[in-house]
Amino acid sequence: MNENWMQKYEEVKDILVCPTDLESYFTLNEIEGQPLETIEIGSVSLPSGKIVVRDPLVSLDNHQSPYFIQAPKGNFPVTISVVKSEDWGDRYAVVKVEFTKEKPVIYSEALIGIEELEGVTEDDYFGFGVDAGLGCITDKEVLPFVDQFVEESNVDNMYDDYFAELFAQNYKENPSNQREAGDWINWKVPNTEFQIPMFASGFGDGTYPVYFAYDANDNICGLYIQFIDIELALSEEGDEDDVDGNEEDQPENFIFLR
């Protein structure tokens, strides 16, 4: 990130705003006739407030850049909004980190400071890539401990040989809004006190936007990951007839995103 990039960001930041009130996914019982439930999955550890959102099985290491916006430091509760659709099954629509109890009034896309901002339009977003069907939230200062654990684990496949058992066990302990293989865990990095929430990513692989929420006093009050836009999904643009509930059949950059 440099001065020229920041100047361009100031020019386009009002374009990179989520048109959806993401907090409504946590306050309403349904959207467009689709029932919603919420699940609390514990806290995320943010010792520096330099947030990293990534696919934990593909791109979670110390080389990852955090978002350039400074978030609050500490441990903060994480909640998932689940859309319970007859057509799609139970899907994780939005994930929220709550920094304060203040009501969000605007959601600005979280960026790391190297994105190409020239020519950005209101339909664009950058997001983070998912290639293994999972997302997670963590802090830049936690990543070296993740690297150390992976290096010392001596396993061939981190999911099959380690994480799969944790997800399955969490399903047994918290079966609501999960499949039998498990759809979320709150992983405590071994030999630390750091918590990294991990969760299924909407309809699977693709690119998903992340937003910092600001209150009426322009203070950061939350972080939101948007996996599914229900209104768009049910619109003609969403082409609902193409949805068969099988995430393996969904293309990347699925239309359910803005």
Image (spheres, rainbow, N blue to C red):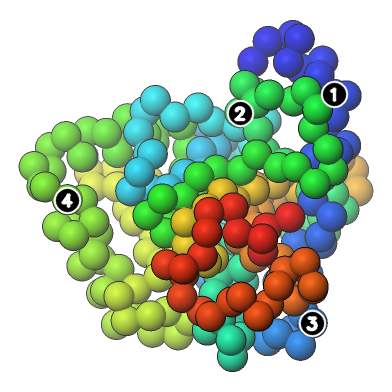
Q: Earlier in the sequence, mark 2 or mark 4?
A: 2
Q: In screen coordinates, is 190 left or right of 32?
A: left
SS type, badge 1? helix
The residue positioned 79% from the left and 73% from the top of the image is 235
The residue positioned 37% from the left and 54% from the top of the image is 132
Q: Earlier in the sequence, mark 1 or mark 4?
A: 1
Q: Which residue lies under the disc numbered 4?
A: 157
The reply to whether residue 59 is visible in this rendering is: yes
176 or 42: nearer the viewer: 176
**Gap in Å between the C-alphas at discs 1 and 3?**
34 Å
Q: Is residue 99 above or below residue 119?
A: below
Q: Quadrant of the N terminus?
A: top right
Q: Which residue lies under the disc numbered 2?
A: 112
Residue neighbourhood size for the residue with mark 3, other residues' Cα within 10 Å, grouped as few (<14), some (14–19), many (≥20): few
Q: Amino acid at mark 4?
A: Asn
Q: Earlier in the sequence, mark 1 or mark 3?
A: 1
Contact between marks 3 and 2 (CB within 8 A): the answer is: no
